[in-house]
Image (tube, rainbow, N blue to C red):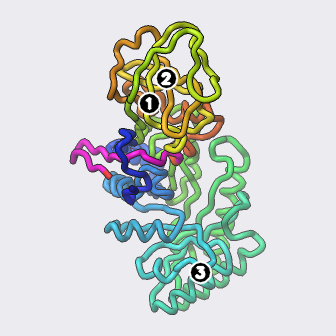
Amino acid sequence: MTTGCGIARTDSGAVASIGLDAVAHNVRVLQQFAGHASVMAVVKADGYNHGGVEVARAAVAAGAQELGVTTIGEALELRAAGIDVPVLTWLHRVDSDFAAAITERVGIGVSTSRQLDAVVDAAERVGDTADVSLKIDTGLNRNGVAEADLDAVLDTTAAAVASGSVRLTGMFSHLACADEPDHPANDAQAERLRDAVARATRRGTPPAAVHLSNSAATLTRPDLGFDMVRPGIALYGLSPVPSLGMFGLRPVMTLSAQVVNIKTVSEGESVSYGYTWTAPTDTVVALVALGYADGVVRRLSGRFEVTIAGRRYPSVGRVCMDQFVVDLGGDGSGVALGDEALLFGTGDRGEANAQDWADALDTISYEVVTGIRGRVRRRFVDARSGEATH
């Protein structure tokens, strides 16, 4: 049975604990790096799978001035929860409901002439002014107004501003190589954004705010801060440039599950599907109730450790759909049925972090935390007000 939080509630004992105090801490760290620029906290994809509404509330309480999401639906969910700070959404289908966004005062990121025309039409139907931010393609070649279309879009924008259909609340872009702070593309993209802003300003429609920096640029390129920064992964306490350390961030998600069985395995006996691991000596193994249906992907088999009772133990054999096995060694003393197994978290109890999983999988921490799913129950922890479980 789903809970409306994007993660299912069951009796498996698996929990993703979300530290809202850590969210607040990370916002404060990011504001220090941002300097004069304001902070837009990105809570798309249900807050990177941490709980979009809850993370948004914590971020705003800690000083984030705006919120960023991908879809209008995500923005409307924040509005329905009573969150009234500016919210920007920037990825739209051909049938996206711009009228609903305008009515709820949701900022609309526009990337094409067609989108701009649709927003103007919706504003005229609603009888209100749309808050529009132009997303400029400065070299990522994904979403955003292409150079070949820019002058036409700026002309249409100026006309829409003059008619009262549109407020130009922003112009922004997205960096392709921000995790390489010295990459020349970063400066080239910034210069293209500055040029686009200058062209809008010459038409008498300067944007209210300009923003470019994602998490990596916020933390490593203060010169690219413009008026606002737009951090995502750093909000959740994970480094966007792991080689440069943690920047004082605190991981927000801790994933844990329960030890549900303990048994002896004799020397020469094998464990789990395919017999990919064979006990080199008599040993004791523990079964943990979490598997690839929950986000512990099969490719992690034999490549990660869990912490139980303050000690790390290696996973052995293949990860299954619902469970995996760890080798306790010796007689398994110190581990009991029902014990909590920490898969990743803050590291305060000796456990791995999401970046360790990312390294093992040759991916990024974003994929690790957004991949937790299935029967994992989400629990929100805030030292100031206790726990709220969803």
In magenta, the rendered stretch is: 371-389
Q: Position of residue 139 (x, y in %)?
A: 73, 58
Amino acid type of the residue that numbered disc 3 sits on in the rendered structure: Gly
Q: Are marks 1 and 2 in contact (CB under 8 Å)?
A: yes
Residue 243 visible somewhere in the drawing: no
Q: Are marks 1 and 3 in contact (CB under 8 Å)?
A: no
> Which quadrant is home to the N terminus?
bottom left
Q: Is residue 84 magenta?
A: no
Residue 22 visible somewhere in the drawing: yes
Taking depth in this image into account, of 363 and 118 the one nearest to the observer is 363
Q: Earlier in the sequence, mark 1 or mark 2?
A: 1
Q: Secondary structure at mark 3?
A: loop
Say left or right for 249 vs 80.
Answer: right
Residue at (49, 18) in percent of width and height: 327
Residue at (57, 27) in percent of width and height: 272
| Label 1 vs label 3, nearer the camera | 1
To which residue does mark 3 refer? 204
In the image, residue 136 above or below residue 381: below
Taking depth in this image into account, of 328 and 148 the one nearest to the observer is 328
To which residue does mark 1 refer? 288
Q: Secondary structure at mark 2?
A: strand
Amino acid type of the residue that numbered disc 1 sits on in the rendered structure: Val
Q: Position of residue 146 (x, y in %)?
A: 73, 69
Classify mark 2: residues with Cα within 10 Å, few (<14), some (14-19) or many (20+): many
To which residue does mark 2 refer? 326
Taking depth in this image into account, of 286 and 200 the one nearest to the observer is 286
Considering every residue shown, the one lying at the far left of the view is 385
Say left or right for 385 vs 209.
Answer: left
In the image, residue 90 above or below residue 331: below
